[in-house]
Image (spheres, rainbow, N blue to C red):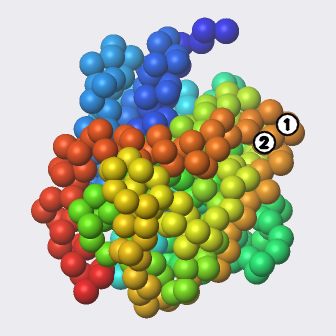
């Protein structure tokens, strides 16, 4: 059915949000997509240059922390659905400034929940509040086991604590006020437009510039990695076909120890840059561990796989290669985001 709908995407100028916005704008020309973003250091309209003139795309600059602004916005547009991605997203930043994570991730989410609840009142037919979250809310695993949708929350960083808190509020609004919601908890994403404070784009940028590759601890931290467009596809599927009052885990079935991932990336980069094999690996340096660092995350994504048939479309090697090629072809993007404030942040982080 080609139902015209007004959909609010928050954080659409960020890494994952930009892929979600692009997918929805292109795939659903009969939807109106509203991208609400405060354009913090992580938000970048360059991520959406290719679709910015589409007639079904609207950009709104604004901050979800402002209750007044959000109430106003929901009064002005008749949103049928919310896909909420806006967040402070970087664990290291949450360690130095936890309160800003509470403001955006908890209070910001509350403002959206309250606005949706009051505008939709009890007429929840065809409405949906979709909250995007992370597997980090589950805490850390040992060598074995997986996070499932029923794993107890045990967040270890201020970032994951703020996301866990927002997840709980979304669920509570579903239970208390019957707000139709979905939550998904996804593993680490990578791909085009990834801000170079995160491991993969940081290392791609450093390899290009022959700078050291700072690996935390002994490099044995294990993460599950998912190509960002596969996450956007899962979000699309859940938004349309997921069941209200449910949470879904999304993952890549793709666990890597950091050090092995870095070696794989070094090999791909050597090939792409025409450097002798082994050149980039020489840049690896081990640095002091992050406090409260979780040893291993691994997601059991069998619910979304069995119920809705979702699975990743690319292997890690394919996705990494696509990512490297994108960064090499988009030097201008990389130059823009790594100038100014980024330098300051980088110097402080790795001094
Ligand atoms: P990001 O930091 O790249 O983007 C966040 C976006 O939100 C930016 O465009 C920023 O300008 C905007 N924003 C921040 N504070 C805001 C505010 N107060 N008001 C309005 N806009 C604001 O983050 P990302 O990696 O794309 O993550 C998006 C969402 O997905 C987050 O909720 C994150 O918790 C979740 N998530 C991320 C990953 C990952 O690997 N990156 C994995 C699982 C879940």
In the depicted structure, whether residue 155 falls above or below residue 241: below
Mark 2 crowdedness (10 Å alpha carbons): few <14, some 14-19, many ≥20: many
Q: Which residue lies furthest to the top in this view?
A: 2
Q: Nearer the viewer, residue 287 or 24?
A: 287
In the depicted structure, whether residue 88 falls above or below residue 323: below
Ligand 1 placement by image quarter = bottom left
Disc 2 and disc 1 in contact, CB within 8 angstroms: yes
Q: Which residue lies furthest to the right in this view?
A: 306
Mark 2: secondary structure: helix
Q: Nearer the viewer, residue 179 or 62?
A: 62
Drawn side of residue 150 relative to residue 319, left or right: right
Q: Which of 335 and 136 is in front in this view?
A: 335
Say if residue 122 shows up in the picture.
no
Q: Residue at x 51, y 66 (%)?
A: 263
| Quadrant where the N terminus is found in the figure | top right
Drawn side of residue 255 relative to residue 148, left or right: left
Mark 1: secondary structure: helix
Mark 1 crowdedness (10 Å alpha carbons): few <14, some 14-19, many ≥20: few
Ligand 1 within 8 angstroms of badge 1 C-beta: no
In the depicted structure, whether residue 150 falls above or below residue 302: below
* Cα–Cα span, label 2 and label 1: 5 Å
Q: Residue furthest left?
A: 340
Picture coordinates of residue 6, whole percent (x, y): 48, 23
Q: Residue at x 44, y 85 (%)?
A: 286
Drawn side of residue 48 relative to residue 337, left or right: right
Residue underneath mark 2: 304
Picture coordinates of residue 112, whole percent (x, y): 48, 48
Q: Residue at x 44, y 22 (%)?
A: 25
Say if residue 230 shows up in the picture.
yes
Picture coordinates of residue 36, whole percent (x, y): 36, 40
**Total numbered labels placed on residues in the image:** 2
Residue underneath mark 1: 307
């Amino acid at each position: 059915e080609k139902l015209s709908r007004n959909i609010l995407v928050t954080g659409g100028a960020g890494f994952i949000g930009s892929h979600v916005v692009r997918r929805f704008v292109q795939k659903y020309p009969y939807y109106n997509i509203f991208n609400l973003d405060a354009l913090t250091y992580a938000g970048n309209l360059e991520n959406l240059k290719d679709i910015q003139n589409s007639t079904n795309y609207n950009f709104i600059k604004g901050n979800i922390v402002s209750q007044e602004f959000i109430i106003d916005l929901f009064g002005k547009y008749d949103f049928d659905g919310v896909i909420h991605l806006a967040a402070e997203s970087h664990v290291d930043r949450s360690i130095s400034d936890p309160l800003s994570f509470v403001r955006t991730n908890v209070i910001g989410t509350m403002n959206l929940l309250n606005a949706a609840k009051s505008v939709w009142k009890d007429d929840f037919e065809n409405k949906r509040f979709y909250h995007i979250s992370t597997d980090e809310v589950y805490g850390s695993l040992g060598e074995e086991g997986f996070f499932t949708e029923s794993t107890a929350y045990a967040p270890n960083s201020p970032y994951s604590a703020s996301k866990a808190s927002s997840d709980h509020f979304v669920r509570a609004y579903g239970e208390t006020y019957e707000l139709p919601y979905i939550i998904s908890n996804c593993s680490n994403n990578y791909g085009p437009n990834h801000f170079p404070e995160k491991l993969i784009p940081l290392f791609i940028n450093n390899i290009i510039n022959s700078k050291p590759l700072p690996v935390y601890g002994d490099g044995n931290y294990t993460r599950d990695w998912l190509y960002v467009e596969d996450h956007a596809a899962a979000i699309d599927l859940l938004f349309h076909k997921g069941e209200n009052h449910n949470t879904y885990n999304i993952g890549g079935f793709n666990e890597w120890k950091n050090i092995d991932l870095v070696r794989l990336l070094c090999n791909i980069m050597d090939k792409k840059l025409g450097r002798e094999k082994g050149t980039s690996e020489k840049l690896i340096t081990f640095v002091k561990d992050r406090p409260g660092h979780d040893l291993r995350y691994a997601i059991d994504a069998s619910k979304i796989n069995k119920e809705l048939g979702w699975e990743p479309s690319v292997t890690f090697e394919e996705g990494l290669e696509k990512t490297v090629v994108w960064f090499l072809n988009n030097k201008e993007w990389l130059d823009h985001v790594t100038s100014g404030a980024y330098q300051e942040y980088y110097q402080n982080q790795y001094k």
